[in-house]
Image (cartoon, grey):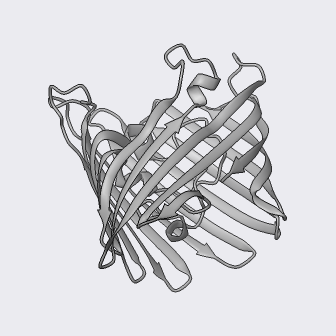
Amino acid sequence: MKKLILVAAIAATSATAVNAATIYEGKGLTYKLKGDLQVQLRDNASKTKDAEIEFDDLELKNSVSYDLGDGMKAFGQLDFGFKNAAEDKSDYKGSQLEEAYIGIDFGGVAVAAGKQNYATDEFGVEGAYEHYEAEDAFDAVSTDGDDVIRFDASFNNVTLIASTELKAEGEGSENGSSYDLFVATEVGDVELAAAYQTYKKTPSSDAVDSWGVSAAVDLGTVALAADYSTSDTGTNDLDIYNLVAKFNVAETTRVFVGITKQELDATTDVTQVYANVTYKFPTQKNVSLFAEVSDIEEDGKDLDLDMLMGMRIKF
């Protein structure tokens, strides 16, 4: 689930992970380990599934940085996910490499290369734990790759992220090419963001162009946000809308209420209305309990309610 407030959710590519446990620090070297363990009981909206235990996510993130002096840092990231292995997917009998990149942080500006997320992965204001369909148009196309060069910069109240996925034609890591751009800023109490992507699945494929805009405002106990994103594949046009409100019921408890609507030309129309509540233990904010219910309508037909409850531990 992405954070509701846009700019607050943006982190530099450099390995300065919040909530990470520092394993070693000395002689200019810092090694941090970050974990995200989420296990939930879910009754999926699909009529072909019974209630089951799901893992979303099981991740271990290794961050290494060296102080190079003069405000510069060299960093590396190596992330492993165990979700598919835990769910006994036939293709994954062990861990799955999720991110592997290195780069240099110049202080406010960072450049990284390797297996990582595109700039457009930062887009979105939805607040659901689980989505029946893609959460935005970029998610429906592609949001990460193996041959990515990414540029992150922060100037006063403007955040700019750009990335490109190399064609890598003929290489084992070939999985498409992409150019992505994401920008976010604050105007008074309103946070605005926009994103653009042009993606080719193969060198001979037609380019898929996608773009999106979003806005969020924090009113204290209530935050409101909306986004719209669209993709033009040449044959089918995809439009996705998100509206969401966050209520701070107490210092330890927050509630999200939202709606996601997806339209794929005249062939598919999916609407998901959801509400969830998250409780964070006052003595340990990285330990939380949550529950969510979603009402889903697909092409005018109501599906079964999608319900889940679970626990999350981060460090």
In the figure, is residue 258 to the left or right of 282? Answer: left
Q: From this view, report whether residue 158 is shown above or below residue 266.
A: below
The number of numbered badges drawn on the structure is: 0
What residue is shown at x 42% (from left), y 42% (from top)? 99
Name the residue rendered at 66%, 54% in the picture: 315
Quarter residue 5 falls in: bottom right
- Compared across the picture, whether 234 is left or right of 142 comes to left
Percent of width and height locating residue 104: 30, 62
Judged left or right of residue 299, residue 286 is right
Hey, which quadrant is residue 88 in on the image? top right
Percent x, y of residue 139: 45, 43
Q: Nearer the viewer, residue 129 or 206?
A: 129
Q: Measured along the vertical axis of the image, is residue 72 above or below residue 195?
A: below
At 82% from the left and 65% from the top, the residue drawn is 252
Q: Nearer the viewer, residue 284 or 24?
A: 24
Q: Which residue is rendered at x = 30% and y = 57% of the image? A: 103
List the single residue furthest toward the top: 90
Q: Is residue 116 visible?
A: no
The answer, for residue 231, to whether it is visible in the render is yes
In the displayed structure, 4 sits above or below 315; it is below
Name the spot of residue 259 as percent of width and height, x first.
64, 51
Single out the residue that lies furthest toward the bottom.
Answer: 188
> In the depicted view, which residue is nearer to us: 1 or 223?
1
Question: Does residue 10 lie above or below 92 as drawn?
Answer: below
- Foreground residue, 62 or 36? 62
